[in-house]
Image (cartoon, helix red, strand yellow):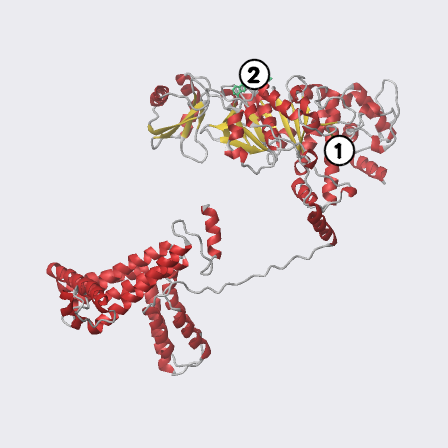
Amino acid sequence: MAKAKKTVKPKKKKSIKKPDLTLSSQQKLVLGSFLIILGILFFIAFLSYLFTGHVDQSALSEFGSREVVTKNWLSKLGAWISDLFIQRGFGVASFIISGLTFLSGIYVLTDLNKAKLRKHWFWGILVIIWLSIFFGFFTHINDSLSGVIGFEINSFFQDYIGKIGTILLLTFAFISYLAIRFKFTPQRIASMFKKASKDIQKDFNDDFVPVDNSYSDEAEAMKSAFEVDKKVEPTISNHSKIEGTTQLEVNPTIPKKQPTTTIKTETISPKIEIEEPKVEIEVETVKEELSETDNLANKLVEDFGQFDPTLELGNYQFPPLDLLKKYDNEGVTINQEELENNKNRIVETLNNYKIGIASIKATIGPTVTLYEIVPEAGIRISKIKNLEDDIALSLSALGIRIIAPIPGKGTIGIEVPNKNSTIVSMRSVIASQKFQKTEMHLPIAIGKTISNETLVVDLAKMPHLLMAGATGQGKSVGLNAVLTSLLYKKHPAEVKFVLVDPKKVELTLFNKIERHYLAKLPDEGEAIITDNTKVIHTLNSLCIEMDNRYEMLKNALCRNIVEYNNKFKARKLNPNDGHAFLPYIVLVVDEFADLIMTAGKEVETPVARLAQLARAIGIHLIIATQRPSVNVITGIIKANFPARIAFRVSSKIDSRTILDAGGADQLIGRGDMLYTQGNDMIRIQCAFVDTPEVEKIVDFIGGQKAYPDAYLLPEYVGEESGTSLDVDITDRDVLFKDAAEIIVTAQQGSASLLQRKLKLGYNRAGRLIDQLEAAGIVGGFEGSKARQVLVVDLVALDQLLENEKK
Ligand SMILES: Nc1ncnc2c1ncn2[C@@H]1O[C@H](COP(=O)(O)OP(=O)(O)OP(=O)(O)O)[C@@H](O)[C@H]1O
């Protein structure tokens, strides 16, 4: 609300009245005009008092009587009010009150900034008091100059600090007023004096000068002296301002002194005028010229509306929250005693190592409590870091993690597991505002941070996720949490899953939503892939899908899937040209280690290719593994998976393999995890979603109307279908070029070399040799001897392959 108000405000000027929270427009009109009239009444009464006050003085005692005649222009009331304000109040300074009242009326009517009005009153009252004290000096001339208040204060000052003291005090008040109110500085005053003396000198030299900047400069200087304040109190009257400007502009050769005085009067006696009129500029937006296709697209959008990819399953219902379980032990449960004990032990332990603590703060999370310590001055953080193991031993709790220092803070963190950890239910994170209101493309409510905040991350931004953790530490639950998040947020038309599950048990549940959310190869029975050869086919098929999508993006002149889909929705892309709405594809591979061990390069190559290139076209990979050893998570995979989740692992080395840092070995399991997206590491308690809950969700979705089939991936012709001598270069094995390079580099035409280097099976390596022979890279079969290599080096090989394409 407040924001909306803010954005609207600057546009609204006098003409449009902004709704007020307390007063209706009618009330504002009544109050505003009342104040304006009251201001005018005051002014008339005060003005009249200057002429009639002394006559009316005697009548005031009989004020109640109707017969008494008063001379004030506003009769008895005028006489009484002006007597009250001028005689018994602040003297002639009371005129300012009439001005302020008038001003308040204008503010209420035109709904200007109330804070400004308050400022006017504040400064106005100070000026009134100052003036009345100042005029107190001159009461011998006329006692209504200062009023009783001014006179009394003045004589009070004079009694205590004398006449000179009072004058000095008033001077000081005056300077302070100028400095604070008008932002006057000595430099500004000096520069004004300088300018003035220069001008005088010039005047002296010649009476008339051709127009120069000094007028406007001076005007500027004076103006700028007040400019800072303009926002607070726009004082220059429109009328005089316009006059000043015209004089300056129209008479280019007028004598200098004249305009100077004009400007001075203009600035020194600020008249009451509320808002400087701002000439508003109306910007006409020029319509972009439309191209032919745009016109057509606009017409189509006009006729049929934007393309809605969800239309085919228009009645699709998202799973309700009720399908997810509520847990009793949700919410933070750590008692004061535990907190106190831990704190004491930390303080004691650190004291044993001569580390003094300046302060300590605890943040209680779902699984661990973070004690944030500020060490005493002079203690080196590296010292604490080195003592990590000793401190953990002394605190003798499993899973103590020391963060020294906490990034971005000068403090040290010690995370101590809570005795009773709490479950972070999937329901709580899905129901969180953060998740419900997110605008992310592929939002994942992964769990809660140490300070109990729900963490929602965007898979589309990651752009791929690597998950590792020893068995039983929460990996499968983590995968389910990811999938559940997407099911709760994305329509079947918007996202498709390719699920690879060599364990055959974890992801089978999702079979029920095959025709809603899964993608598969054509002619495959089941969408969930459990067989290694099928995995290789699917990965290669995804590579083809990727290439196809890139082609579509290129033709549509789009840089990424979001732009492409927006263009498609705006009906700017013709389905007859091969365009279609592109759903995101999320490839989930459980037990990646298992795959790499059995299929080696055949899996690694397409995975690496997808990881490198697929982000822009909406294919995202989630890879989970139990064994995070370097031959599973190779350099090329790591380089392309900046987002990583580590559940508890058994060794520091494993932790380093996944996170490039220790820490995952000190987690406590059961969904306790570390998450990094390339820079900082955050400790998260993974949201818990149990198999029965997932089952309910997939049943709910599976029970609804579905597409006729799963999302079909492009067909991939695998190695089995190749003949022994493939001459057609388009039918070559994807590893053909790699194989040729290995053979040429080694100058040894043997299948076993390929088997070793490319981690291939014998059959495939043999077939590669056959294809190399057909391409003229290796010679014919020579019994037990290795084949002859016919290409001398890699340059020659490149040339040969280039020539082939022509
Ligand atoms: N986020 C969590 N919150 C609470 N408990 C959890 C959480 N995640 C896992 N657990 C507990 O740990 C058990 C094992 O989790 P999970 O099946 O996910 O392990 P895993 O790492 O997949 O094991 P494996 O690799 O053998 O499949 C769960 O049954 C559950 O009791």
Residue labelled 1 has its Cβ within 8 Å of some atom of ligand 1: no
Looking at the image, is 149 positioned above or below residue 709?
Answer: below
Q: Nearer the viewer, residue 343 or 71?
A: 71
Taking the spot 21% from the left edge, 67% from the top edge, the residue there is 76
Q: Residues within 10 Å of mark 1 (few under 14, many from 20)?
A: some
Q: Position of residue 400 (x, y in %)?
A: 44, 21
Residue 720 in sight from this viewpoint: yes
Looking at the image, is 648 positioned above or below residue 245?
Answer: above
Q: Nearer the viewer, residue 16 or 332?
A: 16
Q: Which residue is mark 2?
A: 472
Q: Quadrant of ligand 1?
A: top right
Which mark identifies residue 460? Answer: none
Residue 750 in sight from this viewpoint: no
Mark 2 / mark 1, whichever is N-terminal: 2
Label 2 to label 1: alpha-carbon separation = 36 Å
Q: Position of residue 405 (x, y in %)?
A: 43, 31
Quadrant where the C terminus sits is top right
**Is label 2 in a helix, a strand or a loop?**
loop
- The amino acid pointed to by label 2 is Gly
Looking at the image, is 376 positioned above or below residue 12?
Answer: above
Q: Position of residue 237 (x, y in %)?
A: 38, 68
Taking the spot 59% from the left edge, 61% from the top edge, the residue there is 284
Residue labelled 2 has its Cβ within 8 Å of some atom of ligand 1: yes
Q: Which residue is mark 1?
A: 544
Q: Nearer the viewer, residue 231 or 678?
A: 231
Q: How many marks?
A: 2
Q: Position of residue 638 (x, y in %)?
A: 62, 29
Looking at the image, is 298 positioned above or below residue 270?
Answer: above
- The amino acid pointed to by label 1 is Ile
